[in-house]
Amino acid sequence: MEVVILGGSRPIGKLAADAIEKLLLRKPDAVLGLATGSSPLPVYEELAGRHAAGLDFSRASGFALDEYVGLPDGHPEQYRNVIRREFTDRINIDPANVHSPDGSAADIPAACDAYEAAIAAAGGVDLQLLGVGTDGHIGFNEPGSSFASRTRIKSLIEQTRKDNARFFTSLADVPHHVITQGLGTIMDARHVILIATGAQKAQAVRDFVEGPVAAICPASVLQFHPHATVLVDEAAASALKLADFYRHTYDNKPSWQGL
Ligand code: GLP
């Protein structure tokens, strides 16, 4: 796991966008794993700018990490609409190649299996963007999620509903159920970039980067990922024991290495 401590959201967005741009230049039909939440927004902002300057997404495809269950089609907080609004409508990716779990499917288990099959048919995710919840969740894999889990329905912990209530009129409007790629699904991505900013993430970052690998902290599974990059600002890094080591390592990294 590589930890990079940066001065704020802007440099984090640029560095993650550099990795995505490099990937697209090497592999124009790359498969991107797309996250919602505020953490990846600087990356989408940066990529929209690079698209305006010529970066081509026409052969790329995208798979959203998760989705609420039961929100009516067209609801602004349906993650499929958030991903479109914040990112894919701002670039030239083919809308037919942007996929989300179907939170209004009549047969949820079948929809989850179909989602896994669609990711596999696309060749797997090349680069997965992630945020992290204050309880250490990734996607919507709450504490206790199996490290082997695949796309499935989950119940949200009350803290996550409270954290996400800012996007809804009231806490009562936040769904209790979601569909999320499993931890096993996320671990299959070839490269994972997790972004965390702000002091409210400091404990979760400390727990998943330097704590034991345990289901109580789902993001800790990334310690087993062969290519996981963690981009944090100073506030989110403030509880890390080895912060100086991570800074020293990144500052002295050979330039040919990239992320
Ligand atoms: C939600 C999403 C996660 C996201 C998390 C953190 O629960 N399902 O994918 O990582 O929120 O959100 P934020 O980046 O806004 O802090």
Image (cartoon, grey):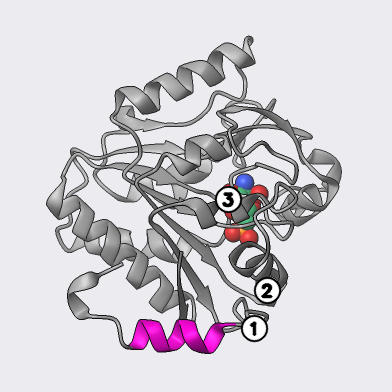
Q: Is residue 125 visible?
A: yes
- SS assignment for the magenta stretch, majority: helix
Is 158 left or right of 121, judged from the image as shown?
right
Q: Which residue is mark 3?
A: 221
Q: Whole-percent x and y of residue 116?
A: 46, 24
Range covered by the magenta-colored residues: 242-251
Q: Residue at x 61, y 57 (%)?
A: 132
How packed is label 2: few (under 14 Cα within 10 Å), some, or many (20 or more)? many
Query: Observer-nearest residue: 66 or 104?
Result: 66
**Is tag 2's residue or tag 1's residue first in the polypeptide sequence?**
2
Q: Residue at x 63, y 82 (%)?
A: 241
Q: Which residue is mark 1?
A: 238
Query: Observer-nearest residue: 118 or 243?
Result: 243
Magenta stretch: includes residue 204: no
The amino acid beneath tag 2 is Ala
Q: Residue at x 85, y 47 (%)?
A: 158
Q: Whole-percent x and y of residue 92?
A: 24, 44
In the displayed structure, 200 sits above or below 131; it is: below
Query: Observer-nearest residue: 202 or 107?
Result: 202
**Is tag 3's residue or tag 2's residue first in the polypeptide sequence?**
2
The amino acid beneath tag 3 is Val
Is 243 left or right of 170, judged from the image as shown?
left
In the displayed structure, 239 sits above or below 195; it is: below
Q: Does the CB distance between marks 2 and 1 fall below 8 Å?
A: yes
Q: Is residue 51 visible?
A: no
